[in-house]
Image (cartoon, rainbow, N blue to C red):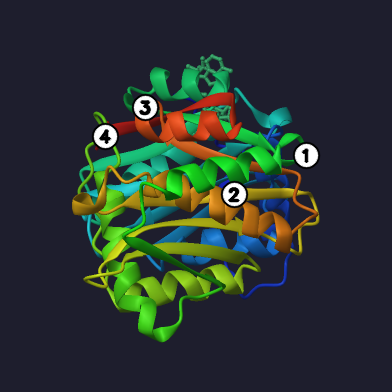
Amino acid sequence: MGLAWWMQLEQVDFDADDGRVAAFHEIHRLIDEAGPRMTLRHFTSFIRYSWSGDRAESYLAIEDGEVAGGLVLEFPDYDNTHAAMLRVLAVAPPHRRRGIGDALLQRAIERARAEGRRLLIGESDGAEGEAFAKARGFELGITSARRVLDVGAVDWHALELGRAEAARHATAYVTERWVGPAPKDRLDDMVVLMTTMNEAPFDDLDIEDEVWDVARWRRHEEINKGAGLRTYTMIARHGETGEPAGFTRLLMDPGAGDGWAWQADTAVVGGHRGHRLGTVLKLANLAWFHACEPSVERIVTWNAASNSHMVGINEAMGYRLLDLWYEWQLPV
Ligand SMILES: CC(C)(COP(=O)(O)OP(=O)(O)OC[C@H]1O[C@@H](n2cnc3c(N)ncnc32)[C@H](O)[C@@H]1OP(=O)(O)O)[C@@H](O)C(=O)NCCC(=O)NCCS
């Protein structure tokens, strides 16, 4: 491993007005040129607070006073306390293959051990990340496929016919929808629905189910709002029992102005599967979202490559494969 003695690692100080987070953001933006890029506001929130308030730490590689790379590590506390999540490990292109990646990884390993974590989990897209992960002994945990929907190519009439046809199989259910954080009297529903997300396949990835409660869900929504994101949620409820039966969420960042949106979680609760609720929810939410956010041109989504059911729905909607992402794990 390279010693990289000519650079220093410094922990990010979010209160210092030194432009370093902005420099890190620029490096991060270069990792993935094919997909949506986070605004500085979104990126800062993501590295500081993670998605749901898990403890996070960021370190920068500084060379001659400039940011040459960075690392974001998360320590889940609600669940998965055996693992540390490597959310970002990135080196600016002119500084690659000089040992900075190794130095950042070494710091991640030291911090993970110091926190009593036995596993480091990180993801990559692209050949360089894959080569680095393999060279440093990471094992593949799961392959995810990223798909994109070209919103301009959607046949809205056909989509409505498809929704109406699917809805004929789901007459025992009603849908509800809202923009932004869930209303107070829907928080318990969101806990049930988010817990169902644990049933998506994780293949060989050594992770436990995520534990959701109202406080954690609220925190997640506050963070999203603070990051500048707008969320469109649709849920299905069983008319007779009132049970929450399924949900889906689309997110966009009005401050980005780049025409991108994200299709986030979709799940149908165990006892309510087989009524085409997944299809109804996704088609109805997309039509509503499009009516509210006509400037969105492309929607991106990730699924486990092995999740044939969800992938089948997405393909039928017009989502097309963009690339594969890999999640890696390293015992530490
Ligand atoms: C992956 C990344 C962080 C590596 O940073 P780096 O500073 O170039 O890494 P290092 O110089 O410390 O490389 C360590 C070893 O990884 C392997 N490696 C790294 N990049 C490689 C490449 N492009 N091709 C083949 N092997 C590579 C080599 O074995 C290398 O050792 P060597 O140079 O002595 O042969 C950088 O390419 C990057 O930012 N990529 C985009 C983000 C990403 O994919 N992150 C990985 C998340 S797991």
Q: In whole angstroms, how far apart are the C-alphas of marks 4 and 2?
A: 23 Å
Which amino acid, mark 4?
A: Leu
| Foreground: disc 4 or disc 2 | 2
Marks 3 and 1, how far apart at CA: 25 Å
Residue that mark 4 sits on: 205
Position of residue 288 measured from the top left corner of the image (x, y, whole percent): 63, 59
Who comes first in sequence, dot 4 or dot 3?
4
What residue is shown at x 49% (from left), y 18% (from top)? 131
Q: Quadrant of ligand 1?
A: top right
Q: Quadrant of residue 171?
A: bottom left
Residue tagged by mark 1?
152
3 and 1 marks in contact (CB < 8 Å): no
In this picture, is 188 found above or below 19? below
Q: CA distance from mark 3 to mark 2?
A: 20 Å
Residue pointed to by mark 2: 262
Picture coordinates of residue 76, whole percent (x, y): 30, 59
* Secondary structure category for the residue under label 2: strand
Q: Nearer the viewer, mark 3 or mark 2?
A: 3
